[in-house]
Amino acid sequence: MRIICVEDYHQMSKKAANIVASQLILKPNSVLGLATGATPLGMYKQLVKTYKAGHIDFEEVTTFNLDEYYGLNKENEQSYYYYMYDNFFQYINIDMKKVNIPNGMARDIHKESLAYERKIRSCGGVDLQVLGIGRNGHIGFNEPDIKFEALTHMVRLDEQTIQDNSRFFDSIEDVPTKAISMGIKTIMHAKKILLLANGKEKAEAIYGAIYGKITPELPASVLQLHPDVVFVMDQDAASKLDLEKLKEEYL
């Protein structure tokens, strides 16, 4: 585990983008696992700048998104397909045939989940998985008490997650209550994991993920078992950590 603490959201975004860019320079045909939400937006903007400057190329890249709301079609402005295209894909030279996002309108979720898993494996697995973290410690949409052995599956969103995501919708009643998400086991199979966190509201979850007991009650705690995980966070998200102790252990 490596811990990187920077001053603010902008610096977090730049550091994260540099890590992703380095992955693409070393392996142009990388398989990237991508996250949505407010946290990685700055990273995507930095990656677009790096691409437009001619330093990285997405032509050979394959992507798999962590999750998608159940019941939203990809034209819906709150779908994660729309988010990815609107904030990232339209600005880079990625082949949209190599973009993979769970189908939130699938009639047979079990079949859709199995197909998603097979496609990840057929591509050789995820080289670099980007994650955010919820206030309750969820990664992807894997809420507390989700079994660690879970693969891609349907999840029922916690009230906390619905409340947190309601800011993106006209009303809380519009927030989907279910989603399709990569499972913990799927995430842990990634060769490298990059977790981003900003803001004081994430501080407790970050502390638990790094120092807490490894338990499904705090899904991100399982990352302690991964052989190559990097946490990049701003000072607010790191506010409950003993940074001097971290320098000795991780930095």
Image: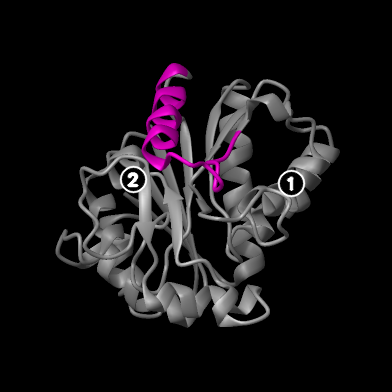
Q: Nearer the viewer, residue 248 or 217?
A: 217
| Relative to 178, residue 187 above or below | above
* Quarter of the image where one finds residue 168: bottom right
Which color scheme did the rendering employ for the protein? one colour
Q: Nearer the viewer, residue 190 or 52?
A: 190
Residue 31 covered by magenta stretch? no
Image coords of residue 127 (percent x, y):
46, 30
Q: Nearer the viewer, residue 209 or 234?
A: 209
* Separation of marks 1 and 2 at Cα, in angstroms: 23 Å
- Comes first in the chain, label 1 or label 2: 1
Q: Which residues are magenta?
A: 100-122
Can residue 236 be seen here? no
Tag 1 and tag 2, C-beta contact below 8 Å: no
- Image side of residue 53 versus residue 195, left or right: right
Residue 138: image tag: none
| Relative to 156, residue 243 above or below | below
Q: Residue at x 61, y 29 (%)?
A: 24
Label 1: how many residues lie within 10 Å, few (<14), some (14-19) or many (20+)? some
Residue 106 covered by magenta stretch? yes
Q: Residue at x 44, y 72 (%)?
A: 161
Image coords of residue 165 (percent x, y):
54, 73
Which residue corresponds to mark 2? 183
Which residue corresponds to mark 1? 85
Image coords of residue 176 (percent x, y):
52, 66
